Image: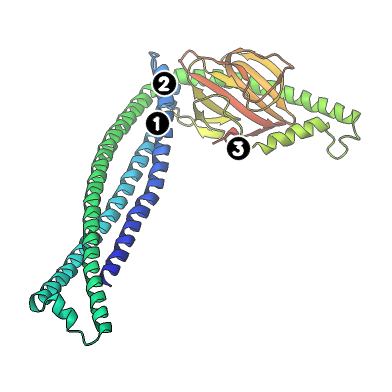
Amino acid sequence: MIAGKAKKFLILALLLMSLGPAVAQKNKTQLQKEKQANLEKIKETEKILSQTSKEKKSSLGELSAIAQRIRQQEALILSVQSEIELMDIDISENNDILKALQNDLSKLKEEYGSMVFSAQKTSGGVSRLMFLFAAPTFDHLAMRFKYMEQYGTARKDQAVVIRKVQEQLAEQVLLIEGKKDEKSALLKEEVAEKATFDDLKRKQNNLVRSLEKEEKRLKSDLQDTRKAVAKLDKLISDIIREEMERAAREAAAAKKKAKETGKPADVVALSNSFEENRNKFPWPVSGFVSQKFGRQKHPVLRGIVLQNDGINIQTAQSEKVRTIFSGEVRAIAFIPTLGNSVIISHGEYFTVYSGLKDVVLKKGQKVTTNQEIGRILVNGDGISELRFQIRKNTTALDPELWLKH
């Protein structure tokens, strides 16, 4: 009976030890996976930052790269802190199991001592043979013999359980010590990452102060960029207007096939296919978003608001730019300041890739997803940045809502 209870507790303790770490391990694995992914992004951003910071003069590209590194560093620190919090919970749970095992071991030893004492007392007063033969009947003798066998077995079982609990105790102590060492390493890592974060913030503040002294140059660059973007917008509008007119002509010639929509069937199918892939499109180039969609404040110049009909993706030098979906090349044009631009139609949708130093496609060429368009341009400040747009006819859409996350 006593040994049976001890076995039940031992089984429960072993279950707690096996299930607890398993649940924690899942979370820990996820955290480590996220941290590794963030480290890969940091490595990519460091490469971009290194290339832009080689230039003698300060640049907005370098500022964007540092801002991105700070965001990534914050995410890395949070990841390490989450690991430490998880480790604290894990250590606490293991300490609870250790206390439970220690308490059970004390009870088992106490019960075992009582059993040994009772056995010694019995054997000291009356011999086993006398105890057996003092039975009034043969059935009583058999029962006494069976009782003595069970009692001896119970003592042996109790000793086995005690030994197993002691072994589990030793393993638990080693496990906790290992987790404490792991936590100590994480704490050191947190200190180091925070130091890196502080260093990045100092660099950012110094760079902003440096750029603020170059207000005249920045305003001149901004004016040139706005003129180039205006030319690009006119080009896009002209191309889209031509496409809409062409679609209308084709629709008029095929009214029966596209009676409900007034558009050719292939245009409708391609447009629907494009829409179905929302949030699934591959990124046209590696890197990070240096300027988001819509209106936003200039990172340095006060009172200046920027309008972006797409997103800017800062990347490494000479990176390949690729299509995000199948379609047809409608225009290739060179615009001073922006470099080469490529416009690809996907039914009613259009994607625009600007900031290329060369283009390997031709106007009218059919393209597939992930097909190379050309390589990214490096401007005078050492910045490699793709200006990327998605439009539904003339309406500009936020590309980040369409690209894969």
**Could you tell me the amino acid type at mark 2?**
Lys
Answer yes or no: is residue 227 visible.
Answer: no
Q: Nearer the viewer, residue 254 or 224?
A: 254
Spot occupied by residue 29 in the image (x, y as percentages of width and height): 40, 42
Spot occupied by residue 47 in the image (x, y as percentages of width and height): 41, 21
The residue labelled by disc 3 is: 279
The residue labelled by disc 1 is: 39
Spot occupied by residue 377 in the image (x, y as percentages of width and height): 54, 15
Tell me the CA gap for discs 2 and 3: 27 Å
Picture quadrant where residue 127 is located: bottom left
Q: Nearer the viewer, residue 105 or 382?
A: 105
Q: Is residue 50 above or below residue 126?
A: above
Ranked by sequence position, the earlier of labels 2 and 3 is 2
Check disc 1: other Cα within 10 Å, few if <14, some if 14-19, many if 20+.
Answer: some
Q: Is residue 191 above or below residue 62?
A: below
The residue labelled by disc 2 is: 47
SS category of the residue bearing label 2: helix
Ranked by sequence position, the earlier of labels 1 and 3 is 1
**Could you tell me the amino acid type at mark 1?**
Leu
**Could you tell me the amino acid type at mark 3?**
Asn
What residue is at 68 percent from the left and 23 percent from the top?
368
Which circle marks residue 275 in the picture?
none
In this view, the mark in front (2 or 1): 1
How many marks are shown on the rendered structure?
3
Query: In this image, 230 relative to 364: left or right?
Result: left
Picture quadrant where residue 259 is located: top right
